[in-house]
Amino acid sequence: MNDLENAGSIGDDNSLLIVDDDRPFLTRLARAMETRGFQVETAESVGDGLRMVEARAPAYAVVDMRLGDGNGLDVIELIRRRRPDARTVILTGYGNIATAVTAVKLGAIDYLAKPADADQIFIALTRDPTEKAVPPENPMSADRVRWEHIQRVYELCDRNVSETARRLNMHRRTLQRILAKRAPR
């Protein structure tokens, strides 16, 4: 998917907001997007991101899902209300189907797992919206399907570990260990 031939072009309004609390990543991505023609503004928190959107909603946005002061989906939701034509992408190190669905419902056009590189992000921001995604070559493993189910129930329980463990008929500590690990391949 790193093929830049799949990328489209940037519209007349090239404003891009990047919201991420990982400063080195934020700096590298901002520089990379500037070299690709975007006019970049950055924020390191949900609060800063919301203030920047209130001041001027960008045409494009790249927002980390989990930030120190809250959920990046709040920024996506405000962008969608302020500027329905904006193209937004969610980045996360904690990818799962439930949060991807929520992100899309709130207005994100794509959902990328970290570490995503600048080419992948550029393609996601500029791709033709009518273009269909290519199905994955390899189906999810049984371990990944189990992990996705646990994550979905965890999100449905508003990230309450005790309630999630009860619903899954699982010991709380076992669930905590599973949640602390990265997703299986």
Image (cartoon, rainbow, N blue to C red):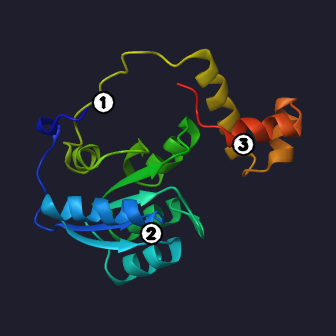
Instruction: Give me the C-alpha separation between circle 3 and circle 1.
Output: 27 Å
Q: Residue at x 50, y 61 (%)?
A: 72
From the image, tell me which residue sits under label 1.
Answer: 133
Question: Badge 1 local density, few (<14 within 10 Å), some, or many (20+)?
Answer: few
Q: Secondary structure at mark 1?
A: loop
Q: Residue at x 17, y 66 (%)?
A: 14
Q: Is residue 118 visible?
A: yes
Q: Residue at x 31, y 46 (%)?
A: 117
Q: Residue at x 11, y 51 (%)?
A: 9
Q: Is residue 26 above or below residue 113?
A: below
Of the two numbered discs 2 and 1 on the same chain, state the one appearing first in sequence. 2
Q: Nearer the viewer, residue 44 or 27?
A: 27
Q: Is residue 172 left or right of residue 118?
A: right
Q: Amino acid at mark 2?
A: Leu
Q: Secondary structure at mark 2?
A: helix
Q: Amino acid at mark 3?
A: Tyr
Residue extending farthest to the front is 24
Of the two numbered discs 3 and 2 on the same chain, state the one appearing first in sequence. 2
Q: Quadrant of the N terminus?
A: top left
- The label on residue 78 is 2
Question: Badge 2 local density, few (<14 within 10 Å), some, or many (20+)?
Answer: some
Q: Secondary structure at mark 3?
A: helix
From the image, tell me which residue sits under label 3.
Answer: 154
Pair 3/2: label in front: 3
Q: Is residue 68 above or below residue 66?
A: below
Indicate the quadrant where residue 83 lies.
bottom left
Instruction: Give me the C-alpha separation between circle 2 and circle 1.
Output: 26 Å
Tell me, yes or no, whether the two marked residues, 2 and 1, touch with CB atoms within 8 Å: no
Of the two numbered discs 3 and 1 on the same chain, state the one appearing first in sequence. 1
Relative image position of residue 124 (x, y in whole percent): 27, 45
